[in-house]
Image: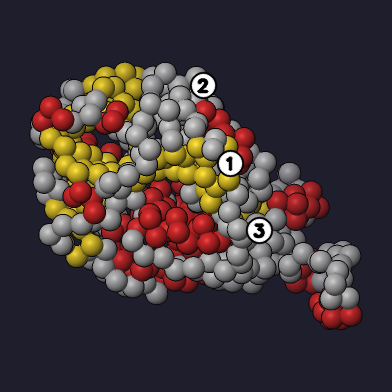
Amino acid sequence: MDGIVARPQTDTPLAYEDGLRGWLDAVEKMGELMHVDGASWDVEMGAITHMMTEKSGSLAPALLFDNVPGYTKGFRTLYGELSSIKRIALTLGLNADYKQRSDIVKEYRAKMRNLTPIEPRYVETGPIMENVLTGDDIDVLKFPVPRHHEADTARYIGTADCVITQDPDTGWFNLGAYRSQVYDGKTIGCQITEGKHGRIHRDKNFERGQPMKVVILCGQDPLLFMLSGGPVPDGISELALAGGLRGKAIDVIRGPYTGFPIPADCEIAIEGETYPGDVLPEGPFGEWMGYYSDDTVPRPVVRVKTILYRNNPIICCAPQHKPVDETGLLKGIAGAAEIWRALDACGIPEVLGVWNHEAAPATRFTVVQIKQRYPGHSRNALHVAANCMGGAYAGKWTVVVDDDIDASDLGQVLWAMGTRFDPNTDIDLIQKAWASKRDPLYLPGNFNNRILIDACIPYDMKLKGTFPKVVDVSGGLREAIRTKFPNIPFPPG
């Protein structure tokens, strides 16, 4: 039957196996998967997702579309896979219970800090080998590739994807999330921003006058997509990080054309090659800042050599919408964890929370929560957060707050900015920073300017105890009230 079918809800996230299929089973048991039948690939899937997520408060379900008109039943698309904290916690193997949202960043950071990467294990075969297309049989449009937004002029097979590239100098494999426009059944795009690892790999090859092989995963374990979309240090493979997070190696096959490691349980893998000077106009596409601000310009294309896919394949999709959208949360959590790691690495003490507010989106509005220990502590935290790899790309606002302010609660952050911030003394600016052309106000040369806000109580007033006392309910009274009135549904905290 056409329409949305709700599933029963449970409270406890479950571990999962078998990549995306096992993840979907676990999400369904959590009550966070909705099935939608009969939606067209042409705009309808994207519109439904937009309408489900825009005011959801990061509680929208994942949407699995089937019975797509004109396509074989079982050829499906998945949207909004990581638009809730519980699903992100499941994906990362974290506890979904938290007092404040930044707690999940804290737990993820701690897990990554103690992580030992596990390199992938090569196997002879896997579900991805159930169907292999070569030569005249190649056609990416055999799948229900969506046109995501009304003003898009093309279909995009790669949005929640993982693009595998190899450094020609070191042999290191990187996974990045780069959009892939469809031109025809054998030609797709691969838009990569300057400074990203995949772009550096491509530039190195093109500078030597040689083509670059590439694999584009269009349906995979959500953990790989999350790692691909977040900042990861140079030289570390997302496949090895995923193995470390899982506690066992990711099984991979060798791509029949590229020889690259392809997860054995992924849904769709496209092998191809991109050549110097082989370009076509790319775009427009509604992007993650919520605008059509990126130019439609000639960009390198990928000539498809092989398509591998599972029976009843699932395309993973993450079209960008006007925030709050389905990817703001996952980008924000991954970026916040990397910012926190950089703060630790630079010796900034007493960092209690880092959060990227989804509506900004991603790292456009970063808040760092600290317990002040010395004069200048807040400014140290601000500048490291704004300039480290996790916060540098396309940032705009960086705010630091005291330990009594929940970095992930925008209401508390605005209160601190409204009462502990002096516009004359508590602003720093960074000019000519690393921007994105998705920013409608990017500057020539692809720069932007940043604003850094110190919304902490002035250190001397904090030290002397001269800042006015906060009106609040003490911890002891809070606990006594909760105990006396157990039936009142107080929010956590």
Q: Is residue 232 left or right of residue 7?
A: left
From mark 2 to mark 1, how far is it between C-alphas? 22 Å
Q: Is residue 383 left or right of residue 123?
A: right
Disc number for residue 354:
none
User: Which one is earlier in the sequence, the residue at label 1 or at label 3?
Assistant: 1
User: Which one is earlier in the sequence, the residue at label 2 or at label 3?
Assistant: 2
Q: Secondary structure at mark 3?
A: loop
Q: Is residue 16 left or right of residue 308?
A: right
Q: Is residue 13 visible?
A: yes
Q: Secondary structure at mark 2?
A: loop
Closer to the camera, 42 or 420?
Answer: 42
Disc number for residue 4:
1
Residue shown at the point (18%, 50%) measured from the top left: 129
Q: Secondary structure at mark 1?
A: strand
Which residue is tagged 3? 407
- Which residue type does callout 1 highlight? Ile
Disc number for residue 150:
2
Closer to the camera, 460 or 204?
Answer: 204
From mark 1 to mark 3, how far is it between C-alphas? 35 Å
Q: Residues within 10 Å of mark 3 (few under 14, many from 20)?
A: many
Mark 2 touching mark 3, by CB under 8 A?
A: no
